[in-house]
Every structure is written in structure tokens, then in C-alpha cells.
Image: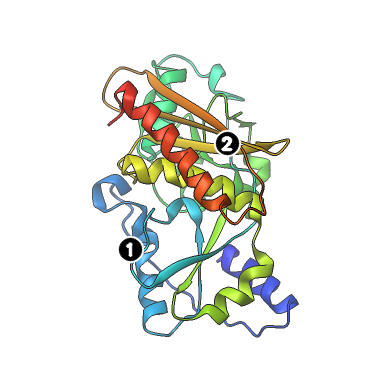
Amino acid sequence: MWQAHHVKDLLEELGHSVTLLGMTTQGDQILDRSLSKVGGKGLFVKELEVALEEGRANLAVHSLKDVPMDLPLGFDLACVMTREDPRDAWVSARYASLNDLPQGAVVGTSSLRRTVLLRALRPDLKIEPLRGNLDTRLRKLDEGQYDGIVLAAAGLKRLGLGERIRHIFETTEMLPAAGQGALGIEVRSAHPEVAQALAPLADATTWLAVTAERAVSRTMGGSCSMPLAAHATWREGVLHLQAAWGDPLGAPVLLRAEGALTLDRDDPQAQSLARALGESVAAQLQAQGAA
């Protein structure tokens, strides 16, 4: 709802009249099982797509990391907005950082990506499932069910909960998920006027970065059941992409790959080139044995 209000406010500043259609998705309702076991993060998207298809909504605002790599026929990702902090955050009442945890401490996350990254950093820890919205996850932590939990920094900051963050992991420690921290807006392909209205909200720099990241996931068949990280950054006109893959049930070892591309953001082929970069990085992971 924060994300929807944010887009509503921006569109109203541009002179549009906007009404919010509040919805609860399957992903919000199923809290007793991990997403990888019940259909993946697409569970946060499907009801919104039905509302678009039935004409009850003109656009849907998503956390981009929840959006499946391939949208259904007739739907488009019309806008990617400026990204908030894409990194993971450490939240704990007693321990200032992951390094401060005693051996065998309990850490909460239901993300396979975070699980393999945590195991690579601290193979002695006990990783336990953690579902629910932010308030629920923080409550479970405060009740003592976990010694610490890992959450997206973007969500905490957007909801004014930044003071709960004890440590933000650098990407060298915990590589983010594809699209983490970015908002994507989905529309029906048959309504180009809606995409045109959203154009001023788009950020080309973020869009190209997440295009490369999502291409890694698409090539790998990425979903919630894929323990995969992919993160792209810009430095002096060069798009740098890193990816990591690990086996959540195997040895706590990560496979890593990276690539870089000099890219003109105004090039009509920029999106295709960013996708090709992601595909090449994914191929590196696959050559190392990532499945």
C-alpha cells in the first residue's frame, strides 16, 4: 500500500486523477509455508493481473523482485522507477552484526537466496523460516523466536522503520536479489495511453540495471525456488553485473560470476544489450555447475 500511495501521489502531481483498489493476494494469505513450496513470488502478482484483465484497474504497482521474469501475454512492464537501497539489512535486538552472533544462533529468513549467502558467511548458524509482513516478522524477532533476521533495507526505510536496522550488508557480503529495491508498474499491452502516462516516472538507469539482473534469473529459470542473487551497478558509463548461486541443501559454497558492458543509456538497443549481459553472466554460472 505504501508503494501504491507513492505512485498515486506522483501521478496526481502530474495532473492525473488516481483511485486505489486495495487487494490482498495469495502471497499475503499463505504464511505457514515458504514461497518456494507454494508457487513462488508470483503469488503476490496474480490477483492484481486479474484486476487489470477485468478492467477494474489500469495499472499495478509491484516490488520488482516479486514480478515473474516472463509476464503473461497481453501484459507489459511499463515503468521501472528509481531504486531505493537494494541491499539486505540485519535486524536484531541483541547483536549488532552477523559476526557478533554466537555459534549455532538462530537467524530468520524464508529466502533461499539469503539462506545460501548466510550459510557461506556463517555455516554454523541455524537458518529458520520467517514469513509475514514486516510488522509480523519484527514481532516474531521481538518475541525471541530468532536471534536476528534479514530483511530488505528498502522495505524498512519506506515504512519508516529504518531505526530497526543494525547493519546493512554490503553487496560483497550479501548480493541482492534481481530487482530488489525497485518498483515496477504493470499494465495491459492494449492500453498504451497508460504506459505513456507513466513515462515520466521511469528511471532509465534503474531500468537497465534490473533488466540485466532479471535476464540472469530468466536464463537460469529463476523463481523463489532458485537460490540466486543478481545485482547490477553503474560506474562511469559502464554497467557492472554480479551474480551468485548456491545449493541450500549442499555444501555452503557459492558459485559467482560477473560481467561488464559500456552502455549508452539512450541507445535504442540498450535494453537488448543489458539482457545479453545478464544472459552471459548466467551462462558463466551454468558452466560452473549451477542448476
> Hey, what amino acid is under mark 2?
Ala
Residue beneath the point at 63% across and 53% down = 267
What is the quadrant of the C terminus in the image?
A: top left
Q: Tell me how the rendering is colored.
A: rainbow
Q: Look at the numbered disc 2 and give the secondary structure of its residue.
A: strand
Picture quarter containing residue 237? Answer: top right
Residue 19 visible here: yes
- State the residue in front, 123 or 46: 46
Placement of 279 over or under 103, stated as above or below: below
Neighbor class of circle 2 (other Cα within 10 Å; few <14, some 14-19, many 20+) is many
> Hey, what amino acid is under mark 1?
Gln
In x, y percent, where is residue 118?
44, 25
Picture quarter containing residue 188? Answer: bottom left
Q: Name the residue under label 2.
A: 89
Q: Look at the numbered disc 1 and give the secondary structure of its residue.
A: helix
Which mark is first along the chain, 2 or 1? 1
In x, y percent, where is residue 109?
41, 37
Q: Name the residue under label 1.
A: 26
In x, y percent, where is residue 133?
46, 53
